[in-house]
Amino acid sequence: QSALTQPASVSGSPGQSITISCTGTSSDVGAYDYVSWYQQHPGKVPKFMIYDVSYRPSGVSNRFSGSKSGNTASLTISGLQAEDEADYYCSSYTSSSTYVFGTGTKVTVL
Amino acid sequence: EVQLVESGGGLVQPGGSLKLSCAASGFTFSGFAIHWVRQASGKGLEWVGRIRSRANSYATAYAASVNGRFTVSRDDLKNTGYLQMNSLKTEDTAVYFCTRNDGTYPFDYWGQGTLVTVSS
């Protein structure tokens, strides 16, 4: 099971919106609506941000939203803030009853 | 408060074995699947394996990179999950996290991780 493909880096200015893509296959992202997203600040534990493609758990800002089209899922951060600077990982359930993470995207706030 | 605390990491030689523990508290441990995820220094997250709950027959699954070498298990009476790692390779060097999944919220809580270093 290969890692899901994410851009290595995405940047934006405060207040702007950015979108991170997560491309898989018809055996993972394209097969199930079980895509989730995690935020990880340096030296910290991953934080659960989005589940089932587009649902936010309690406590996560509504500036974070998720979507999916075919084999590609996306995370959009609107109204970018300095505190959003972190690494972001997508994850998907697979047809092998396993999970796979994305390669990770470093978000920089300019 | 939900807590997951890993232990058992350390330095081991290539070909050696190590068993990690994940002590849980603050939730009904027996109702959750327990997953292990690792992260090599400066690298991304890699899903390692999981064990489901008793209701799901304690089913296990593994990443191809560790299948046949690693075994996940659990003791619901002790609220603890385990990762037995055999035939360790240098590329297994990473921080190992345990996390949980109730089928709705995947990996909503994580432990702080334990470092495993495989080196001669």
Image: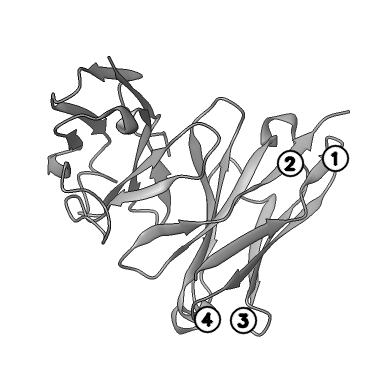
Determine the CA span between mark 3 and mark 4: 5 Å
Number of numbered discs overlaid on the protein picture: 4
Look at label 1 and name its amino acid.
Val
Determine the CA span between mark 1 and mark 3: 28 Å
Contact? badges 1 and 2 (CB < 8 Å): yes
Badge number at residue B115: none
The residue where tag 2 is placed is B116
Q: What is the chain letter for disc 2?
A: B
The residue where tag 1 is placed is B12
Contact? badges 3 and 4 (CB < 8 Å): yes
Look at label 2 and name its amino acid.
Val
| Residue drawn at the location 50% of the way across and 40% of the way down | B46
Pick the residue in front: B119 or B69.
B119
N-terminal of the pair, mark 1 or mark 4, is: 1
Q: What is the chain letter for disc 3?
A: B
| Residue drawn at the location 14% of the way across and 26% of the way down | A15
Helix, strand or loop at label 3? It is loop
Determine the CA span between mark 4 and mark 2: 27 Å
